[in-house]
């Protein structure tokens, strides 16, 4: 909703163009500035309220649709919309159109940053029907009176909610959104097996008996201390608060894409960078067998402890607790295969340059940010590498986010 302090001068009628990062569409304001408009769709004419501005561009929220796109739908979530919950970007967009928008966003980053022309198709992952009920983990913010909600877009303000349509039934069955969490500043709910009574600031809060764990201010208050997941027949344990892909179909989809792309052979050597709890390292270890080897590099000691446990049956998989930096990469020797799955910031130019020097048979780059991926891809292409395949997976329906799995190989020397 428009803020009360806004004047009529803050309201513009705009024609929306291509999608832009941040869940927005690009438009041209009457004064010539570029406008990034959320809650609209390409081709729409909207009335938009300016939410912030600089000398060069402005941000706005579409508050009335004057000419609607055929891809517009009624948002299933009652908390979505201008000025409301910032968790989703595309609740007002039909699911197939969401995927086309994400494909366009990726294509634009590839074109602009990596200088690559490539048509992208965003694929749904197994188990996704309507883009809802996929978050196995939610992070709620808590206000001074203990009421929880999600942050509004680009704001610290909290939108109180009594449920989240993209969270799984298991997460929702905890009902954390409907409880008072006085004294806490953040509550996280993640799917797991659990006990019922938790203590928050000395008070007892009773939760329903469902399969989910709860952490308050980063501290698990209800166990067990790990979540269990199965991927391609392997079981993984993840300490509460540790990294695991959020969509229930994600880990299997990514592992399948990486293994299909790399096609590991018995006896090969592989490295898994930013390895987390060893999702790829364990599966690579199975494929290369005892005549091969895998080195997994991960900075977080707790994740490394999980990775060691998750690969305990594979003595040829070594877990190295270290940051991935150019030095670490150069010390990896000459692996046949590389997989890297860095956080949103990507591997970075220096690490990517070091990777280019390894010249493995094949490299799989798993990326949750198209912009940083395109920057790193540009480095590899500049070093003579080729982009052999690129898949885009819709691991985050209703949001602007998309996961990429790129398969690359060094060109001839
Ligand atoms: C996107 S997760 C990927 C984890 C794993 N591949 C998976 O899919 O479950 C990124 C991981 O990189 C780790 N990480 C972040 N920065 C790092 C760095 N500079 N060096 C090593 N690991 C890092 C994080 O702790 C996290 O486990």
Image (cartoon, rainbow, N blue to C red):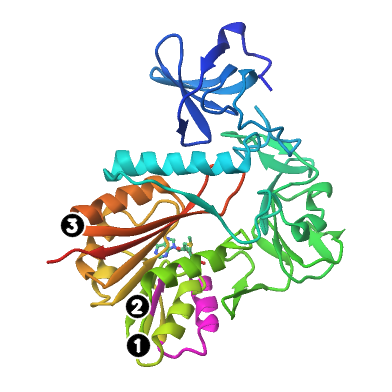
Instruction: Give the class, few, some or many, for how many residues have Cα within 10 Å of label 1's Cα (few <14, many ≥20).
Output: many
Tag 2's secondary structure? strand
What residue appears at the point 49 percent right and 69 percent down from the top-left corner? 255
Residue carrying label 3 = 383
Mark on residue 44? none
What's the CA distance linking mark 2 and mark 3? 21 Å
User: Image height check: is 295 above or below 155?
Assistant: below
Residue 113 x, y percent position in the rendering? 30, 42
Give the alpha-carbon distance from disc 3 to disc 1, as whole Å: 28 Å
Most extreme residue toward the front is 70
Tell me the crowding category of disc 3: few under 14, some 14 to 19, or many 20 or more residues within 10 angstroms, Cα based: some
Q: Say left or right for 350 vs 154.
A: left
Answer with mark 1 or mark 2, whichever residue precedes in sequence.
Answer: 2
Instruction: Using residue 409 as the reference point, say whether residue 210 is left or right of it.
Output: right
Any mark on residue 270, and which? 2
The foreground one among 262 and 222 is 262
Instruction: Name the spot of residue 274 as percent of width and height, x first.
Output: 42, 66
Q: Quadrant of the C terminus?
A: bottom left
Judging by the rendered image, the residue that carries numbered circle 1 is 292
Using the rendered view, name the quadrant where residue 293 is placed.
Answer: bottom left
The secondary element bearing badge 1 is classed as loop
User: Pointer 1 and pointer 2: residues touching (CB < 8 Å)?
Assistant: yes
Question: Magenta span covers which residues?
Answer: 295-316
**In the rendered image, the vertical position of residue 337 relative to residue 125, given as above or below:** below
Q: Is residue 49 highlighted in magenta?
A: no
Name the spot of residue 301 as percent of width and height, x first: 49, 72
Mark 1 vs ligand 1: CB under 8 Å?
A: no
Which residue is drawn at the image coordinates 52% and 31% (left, top)? 24
Q: Marks 1/2: CA distance?
A: 8 Å
User: What residue is shown at x 70% (from left), y 35% (from top)?
Assistant: 75
């Amino acid at each position: 909703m428009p803020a009360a302090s806004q004047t009529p001068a803050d309201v513009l009628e705009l024609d929306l163009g291509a999608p832009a990062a941040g869940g927005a569409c690009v438009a041209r304001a009457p004064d010539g500035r570029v406008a990034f408009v959320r809650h609209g769709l390409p081709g729409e004419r909207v009335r938009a309220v300016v939410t912030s501005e600089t000398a060069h561009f402005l941000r706005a929220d579409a508050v009335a649709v004057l000419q609607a796109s055929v891809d517009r739908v009624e948002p299933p979530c009652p908390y979505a919309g201008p000025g409301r919950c910032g968790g989703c970007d595309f609740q007002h967009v039909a699911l197939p159109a969401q995927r086309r928008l994400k494909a366009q966003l990726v294509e634009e980053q590839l074109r602009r940053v990596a200088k690559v022309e490539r048509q992208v198709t965003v694929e749904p992952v197994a188990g996704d029907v309507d883009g809802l009920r996929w978050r196995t983990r939610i992070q709620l913010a808590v206000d001074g009176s203990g009421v929880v909600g999600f942050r509004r877009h680009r704001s610290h303000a909290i939108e109180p909610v009594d449920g989240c349509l993209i969270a799984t039934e298991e997460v929702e069955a905890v009902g954390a959104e409907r409880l008072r969490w006085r004294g806490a500043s953040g509550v996280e709910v993640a799917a797991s097996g659990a006990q019922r009574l938790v203590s928050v600031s000395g008070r007892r809060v009773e939760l329903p008996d469902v399969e989910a764990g709860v952490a308050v201010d980063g501290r698990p208050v209800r166990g067990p201390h790990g979540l269990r997941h199965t991927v391609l027949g392997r079981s993984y344990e993840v300490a509460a608060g540790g990294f695991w892909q959020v969509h229930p179909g994600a880990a299997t989809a990514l592992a399948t894409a990486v293994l299909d792309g790399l096609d590991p052979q018995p006896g090969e050597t592989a490295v898994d960078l930013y390895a987390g709890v060893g999702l790829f390292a364990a599966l690579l270890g199975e494929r290369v067998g005892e005549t091969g080897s895998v080195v997994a590099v991960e900075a977080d000691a707790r994740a490394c402890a999980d990775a060691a446990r998750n690969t305990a049956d594979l003595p040829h998989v070594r877990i190295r607790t270290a940051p991935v930096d150019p030095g670490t990469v150069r010390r990896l020797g000459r692996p046949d295969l590389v997989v890297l799955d860095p956080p949103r910031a990507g591997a970075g130019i220096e690490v990517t340059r070091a990777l280019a020097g390894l010249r493995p048979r094949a490299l799989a780059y798993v990326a949750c940010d198209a912009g940083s991926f395109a920057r790193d891809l540009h480095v590899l292409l500049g070093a003579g590498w080729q982009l052999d395949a690129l898949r885009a997976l819709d691991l985050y329906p209703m949001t602007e986010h998309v996961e990429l799995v790129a398969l690359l190989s060094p060109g001839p020397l």
